[in-house]
Image (cartoon, helix red, strand yellow):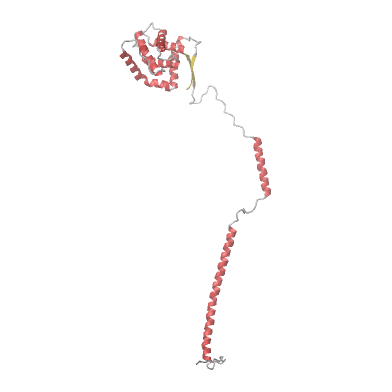
């Protein structure tokens, strides 16, 4: 069994049974055509947006290519003729400097006049004396200091000194003599403080006081560690000898250290000792002199 449906084309006038279907289909077609007309602007808008995006990206790439320079491209190349002239000028200037050589040194300042001396600059002091001369100066000083001993002569004091030094050499307490200019200056420093003329009334007292100074000088300036007491002792009471030693150490300890550490102070004492014998004249002129050269 089947059903057969026969449709006739719609009439122009819209009559007949197919007219209803045609009328129903017509609104449908009209409706579909309107929808296609509504959808078409959306397609156009999306296409325009895409074109704008593509154009914008292309413009960005183009501007990036213009801004970013290629490596190695430094813009306009300099003129080779200018470069060649610059090199020639540089070569000529270097050659002229080599031919001229280094500049001459400035001239030295003129020397100061002989009488002028810059403030604060050291003054050179030269002191000359022989061992015999200093021994005589020491004897003259002791004789003038001990004014109560009218019969005292410088030779007696020198004999006491040489006797002690010879005894120590013969007994083997020292390998070389102690009597040198530097040691005589040290002995003079001790005698100047220890010997008081108003307290010494005899040659025995003077010899005891002088040998005490010699013992301290040998102990402080000598090459040996210790020395025997016998060559320096002329009195029976040893306690008085040690009392004099301790009194001198307490009074002169600072000066004994200073004369060995301060060359200016040593030179001053040296000059004082030499001036003690200038009144007595100059003897032993052929003896070997000891010279001090010091900047003050």
Vertical side of 97 occupied by 37: above or below: below
Picture coordinates of residue 140 (x, y %)?
42, 10
Q: What is the residue that sits farthest to the front in this orientation?
A: 1
Residue, far right: 81
The answer to which image quadrant residue 280 occupies is top left
Residue at 34%, 16% in the rendered image: 245
Task: Residue at 58% x, 58% y: name it.
Answer: 67
Q: Quadrant of residue 206?
A: top left
Q: Nearer the viewer, residue 192 or 53?
A: 53
In the image, is residue 96 above or below residue 84?
A: above
Residue 197 visible (yes or no): no
Rendered location of residue 254, percent (x, y): 38, 22
Let me know if residue 186 appears in the view.
yes
Residue 137 placement (x, y as % from top left): 44, 12
Between residue 77 and residue 273, name the one nearer to us.
77
x and y, in percent, of residue 54 in the image: 57, 67
Q: Is residue 109 left or right of residue 292?
A: right
Residue 35 to residue 7: above or below:
above
Q: Look at 68% across and 45% down and name the residue there.
A: 85
Residue at the top extreme?
151
């Amino acid at each position: 069994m089947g059903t057969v449906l026969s449709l006739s084309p719609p009439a122009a006038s819209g009559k007949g049974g197919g007219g209803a279907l045609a009328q129903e289909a017509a609104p449908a077609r009209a409706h579909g055509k309107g929808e296609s007309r509504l959808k078409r602007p959306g397609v156009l808008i999306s296409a325009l947006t895409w074109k704008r995006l593509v154009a914008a990206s292309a413009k960005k790439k183009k501007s990036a290519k213009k801004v970013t320079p290629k490596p190695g491209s430094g813009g306009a190349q300099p003129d080779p003729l200018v470069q060649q002239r610059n090199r020639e000028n540089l070569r000529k200037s270097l050659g002229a400097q080599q031919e001229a050589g280094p500049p001459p040194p400035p001239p030295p300042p003129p020397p100061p006049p002989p009488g002028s001396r810059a403030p604060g600059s050291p003054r050179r002091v030269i002191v000359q004396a022989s061992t015999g001369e200093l021994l005589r100066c020491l004897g003259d000083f002791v004789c003038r200091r001990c004014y109560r001993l009218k019969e005292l002569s410088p030779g007696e004091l020198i004999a006491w000194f040489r006797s002690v030094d010879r005894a120590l050499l013969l007994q083997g307490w020292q390998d070389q003599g102690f009597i040198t200019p530097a040691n005589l200056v040290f002995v003079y420093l001790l005698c100047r403080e220890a010997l008081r003329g108003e307290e010494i009334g005899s040659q025995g007292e003077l010899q005891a006081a002088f040998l005490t100074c010699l013992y301290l000088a040998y102990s402080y300036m000598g090459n040996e560690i210790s020395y025997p007491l016998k060559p320096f002792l002329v009195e029976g009471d040893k306690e008085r000898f040690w009392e004099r030693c301790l009194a001198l150490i307490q009074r002169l300890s600072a000066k004994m250290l200073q004369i060995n550490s301060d060359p200016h102070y040593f030179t001053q004492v040296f000059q004082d000792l030499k001036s003690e014998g200038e009144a007595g004249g100059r003897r032993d002129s052929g003896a070997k002199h000891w010279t001090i050269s010091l900047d003050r």
